Image: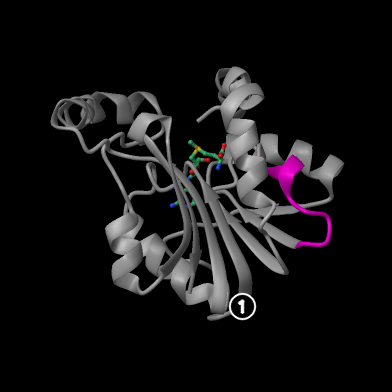
Amino acid sequence: MNGTIYDLIMSTGEKFTRGKLRSELLSHARGKTLEIGAGTGLNFAFIPQNVEYTGIEPDESMRKSALKKEKTFHLHVENGDAQSLQFADESFDTVAATLVFCSIPDPNLALKEVYRVLKPGGQFLLLEHVKRKTPVAGWLQDHLTPVWKHMAGNCHLNRDPESEILRLGFSIEEKKVLWNGFGKMWILRK
Ligand SMILES: C[S@@+](CC[C@H](N)C(=O)[O-])C[C@H]1O[C@@H](n2cnc3c(N)ncnc32)[C@H](O)[C@@H]1O
């Protein structure tokens, strides 16, 4: 995905609801923190100052945009794939991800990796758009996804990682249903 175009498309929503949600979620980041799918760095402004931050982003154009912002915020972003993280077991206090699991080819594998790299008691901060529970909206999301994913960097409109999150053993500390059921924000604990 082109990083400049992504920032342009996202800019209006950032000023309204999304910026506030990012701020609320990321204010919980503590200690050694990993952000997966850091994109163009839209979360950078909300990372607390005392956090030891590493971001991974596999897409070169998105990463380039993040690297430009990296200088302002003094944060570190590198190449990486959430499905096979280059970090040791139990090495992070916090893992954060916003709007990422919709586009990872194997989201369950990535969730397993998040669980692996988190220290016991570590927290997973997550914001995602999800498949709405009502049949009509869900049906539409299922049927739009095959086209939409080609236009929007493999973004699937019809996912919800919550059942896999619970199956892995995370506990939900806080959960908010957003956007009339089209989104969720979780604070999870390993
Ligand atoms: C919709 S963008 C969200 C970017 C950013 N997190 C945000 O909130 O603006 C989805 C991001 O997930 C990244 N992504 C896709 N597959 C990934 C993978 N296997 N590992 C890590 N990131 C991935 C994409 O490159 C893209 O930057």
Quarter assignment of residue 102? top left
Does the magenta run of residues contain 71? no
Residue under label 1: 91
Q: Residue at x 27, y 59 (%)?
A: 163
Q: Residues within 10 Å of mark 1 (few under 14, many from 20)?
A: some
Quarter assignment of residue 18? top right
Q: Residue at x 50, y 52 (%)?
A: 126
The colour scheme used to paint the residues is: one colour
Query: Mark 1 vs ligand 1: CB under 8 Å?
Result: no
Residue 95 spot, x, y in % from top left: 57, 62
In the displayed structure, 14 sits above or below 22; it is above
Residue 14 spot, x, y in % from top left: 62, 26
Does the magenta run of residues contain 46? yes
The part of the chain drawn in magenta is 43-51
Residue 183 spot, x, y in % from top left: 40, 38
Asked whether, in this view, residue 147 is left or right of residue 76, the answer is left
Secondary structure category for the residue under label 1: loop
Quarter assignment of residue 76? bottom right
Asked whether, in this view, residue 104 is left or right of residue 141, the answer is right
Q: Residue at x 61, y 77 (%)?
A: 91
- What type is the residue that disc 1 sits on? Ser
In the displayed structure, 117 sits above or below 41; it is below
Residue 23 spot, x, y in % from top left: 67, 42
In the displayed structure, 162 sits above or below 171; it is above
Q: Residue at x 77, y 62 (%)?
A: 51
Tally of numbered tags: 1
In the displayed structure, 137 sits above or below 133; it is above
Which residue is more in the foreground, 60 or 134?
Answer: 134
Which secondary structure dominates the residues rendered in magenta? loop
